[in-house]
Image (cartoon, rainbow, N blue to C red):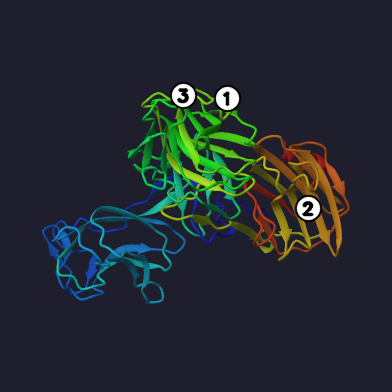
Amino acid sequence: MGTKTYDSATDMITFSRASGGTALSKISYGNNLVTNGTFDTDLSGWTTDTEWVYSNGKASLPANAQSNRSLSSTKAYVKVGKTYRVRFDASTSVGTPVNTSLKIRIWGNDNGTGSFLYNGNYILTGSNEIFLSPTANGYMSFDNVLFNSFDKFIDNVSIEEVLFGQSDGTLLQWNHSNNEPRIEYDATGAVKGLLIEEARTNIAKYSEDFTHSYWKAYNAVTPTGNVAVAPDGNLTADRIAAKNASTNNGAFTNDDVPTGGCVSVFAKADTVDWLGFGQAGSCWAYFDLANGVTGNKSTTVGYTSITAYPNGWYLCQAWGITNSWSRVLFSPKPTEGNGDPWSNVTNAIGDSVFLWGAQMEAGAFPTSYIPTAHATATRARDLAQIPTSAFGYNNDKGSLVIDVLTPVADQIMALAYFNTSTYINSRSLWKSNSAITAAGTYYVRATHDGATTKFALTQQTQAEYTKLGLSYGNNEKAVRDGGTVGSGTSRYPNPTRLILGGRDDSHQSQCWIKSIQYYPRQLTDTQLQELTT
């Protein structure tokens, strides 16, 4: 059937995630789909109910207009499976009203019915930007829902498709919509791969607002809101500054991090270059925001990492915390501390850093940022799978090569899994924990009719890309990074799908899949080694 080459993860992968999910992505926008969104002289390019009128360069809905009066673009046709940026200016004749319920709706879709995309309880005044993922194909419209004793005005309307992965895209920490795959990049613009993660919950309830009373001021720290452009491109980052000369000044919360859990925050240097993590009164991990390296940590912290983001931001993370941190603290520091809670660096008045995107989660390793506002929030698991019928799977002989990045966590992680609906009859590449073999060791497992073949590859020592090759036919074979080829007895599970970064519909790992290759024949040992070097 010939060679099939796919450039996009969406070309053949069936993907689902029942929530949003963030990743550092390249974002750009398509052409404006709206004709005459500025209403310079009339309402041409729009279909209107009788009560929408042209008024002084704007579309206007007079006071006491009937409900469900629609102003619909005749050109802005949107489609399921895409994300759009909708921008418009809104105003009223009486300033800021309440409970007007102006809605954005998709009308005239393929089955002739309307489908709500955005339901606002209040009219949005001023300049607005909303990101929508349509649930039906059709044309965008503004709809009146309730009677109101004032005029509404709409102007400067645009709707553009959000484009991912374009060479001219801007690197932003982007919150992808439900069921939208995340191709992540690093701060240099190099692709990391398709991000696959398990479900997690951020228990930090105001992750982007350090001025909220949820965050307490330890030793009278001064928070200032919305003073710097955050990694998502919005002016939502806050500054925290020491108000007193003290050992520790910072922002902390009364929520606890579970034993063994993770703490993360995006940080940027301001008047000082260091950030301390810990709990109120103590700093147990240090991060250098000038040079992008981690500093000292105490024995209560298993791991720390610092990851560069655009525009001087860093994602600072600590995990493997051996005791429960109560009242988690983020503290600006003039220099590095030694990780001893009784020997912390003393602040000067005004020492400050920028913070955004705090996260506290239970788990063996930190995961991608989950935004919160006034409540905890959960990101659902990613499920990426390819039917074996989509790429000419050969049950008798075949080979699979993947290029994958995984964390150094001591946890079982399924990276590529051929199966049907369970793991009983399957063929897979794993990264193990110490309960199976040496922690971080990759291994191969093939199971059929109760018989299992399993053998180990080499061990991972740091978070890095690794190339894994698997072949089956006369026997099961596998290799990591061009090393020694392992071998075992062949099994024939006859799978119906290939799952990426997971074992089944409910067990996902954390990894970035950079590339996948499948061959409907058993490659030689030398070929496997060459493809994984």
Residue 501: give x, y in percent of width and height: 65, 52
State which tag comes first along the sequence, 1 or 2.
1
How much space separates mark 3 and mark 1, taking CA atoms?
A: 12 Å
How much space separates mark 2 and mark 3, taking CA atoms?
A: 64 Å
Q: Residue at x 71, y 43 (%)?
A: 410
The disc label shown at residue 346, or none:
3
Q: Residue farthest to the left? A: 56
Disc 2 secondary structure class: loop
Q: Amino acid at mark 2?
A: Arg
Would residue 490 appear left or right of 32 to someone viewing this image? right
Q: Image quarter for residue 48?
A: bottom left
- Image quadrant occupied by the N terminus: bottom right
> Tag 2: Cα neighbours inside 10 Å, few (<14), some, or many (≥20)?
some
Q: Image quarter for residue 226?
A: top left
Q: Amino acid at mark 1?
A: Asn
The disc label shown at residue 531, or none:
none
- Image quadrant occupied by the C terminus: top right
Would residue 335 appear left or right of 432 to someone viewing this image? left
State which tag comes first along the sequence, 2 or 3.
3
Instruction: Return the residue at label 2.
Output: 521
Asked if residue 53 is positioned above or below residue 176 in the image, the reply reads: below
Residue 166: give x, y in percent of width and height: 45, 45
Q: Residue at x 61, y 57 (%)?
A: 384
The residue lying toward the viewer, choosing from 402 and 95, is 95
> Tag 1: Cα neighbours inside 10 Å, few (<14), some, or many (≥20)?
some
Residue 296: give x, y in percent of width and height: 59, 27
